[in-house]
Amino acid sequence: GVGKEVVARMIHLRSQRRTLPFVKVNCAALPGELLESELFGYEQGAFTGAVRAKPGKFELANKGTIFLDEIAEMSPHLHAKLLHVLQDHQYSRLGARQVVQVDVRVVSATNRPLQALRGEFLREDLYFRIATVVVELPALRSRPDDILALAQHLTGRLARRHNREISLSRSALELLLRYSFPGNVRELENILES
């Protein structure tokens, strides 16, 4: 809820890859076997129910950016396969013999400090591969200057979604600035919507 995806999208949109795909994957949302097939795709007959070939998220993000949210929730088996993709820019779909070449920027995120995950939740070699540029996003309560800018952005988005004019009074803005936002940006958006 601190805005990891927003930062990942901004990195993508301010890069030379901005016109190419941005693909988001929540690594915590799927069990290991399903996550592997989501990331790397599969061939027809690779497993029961694979009635046709399916490209993975890495293929879909080729030339663009893939955002791996909650990367520490990935199984160690997938860490090894991800490391291979990061090093060699290639992998095989599940059940395939041929190799898929990819050129993709990988942005990863976790809800815990990356250094704290090293070794126990992230393989050491994977840690060094993904820790090339580390951006730490503090909780919203530590960024009071962002509250007003986010509130204006979010009310504009809500106004467009609900097709109505929405504005915040000075007293409403003052209340927002005094609140600690334990739910971060997600809570701010829910408060504004309600």
Image (spheres, grey):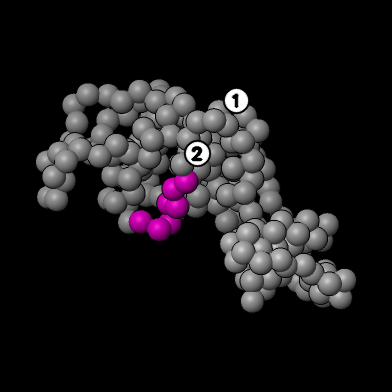
- Is 96 part of what is drawn in magenta? no
| Disc nearer the start of the sequence (2/1) | 1
Q: Return the mark for residue 118.
A: none
Q: Which residue is mark 2?
A: 22
**52 on left or right of 132:** left
Quadrant of the image occupied by residue 161:
bottom right
Secondary structure found at label 1: loop
Residue 176: x and y, percent?
Answer: 79, 71
- Say which residue appears at 39% left-offset and 25% top-offset: 102
The type of residue carrying mark 2 is Phe
Q: Do the residues under discs 2 and 1 have CB atoms within 8 angstroms?
A: no
- Give the residue at mark 1: 16
Task: Locate the C terminus and report the quarter of the image it occupies.
Answer: bottom right
Mark 2 burial class by Cα count in 10 Å: few <14, some 14-19, many 20+: many
Look at label 1 and name its amino acid.
Gln
**Pick the front one: 81 or 26:** 26
Q: Nearer the viewer, residue 54 or 123?
A: 54
- In the image, the segment drawn in magenta is 24-30
Write the residue at 58% across / 49% down: 5
Front-lying residue, 161 or 19: 161
Between 133 and 65, the one lying in front of the other is 65
Q: Position of residue 57 (x, y in %)?
A: 38, 40
Residue at mark 2 to residue at mark 1: CA–CA distance = 12 Å
User: Vertically, is 137 above or below 93?
Assistant: below
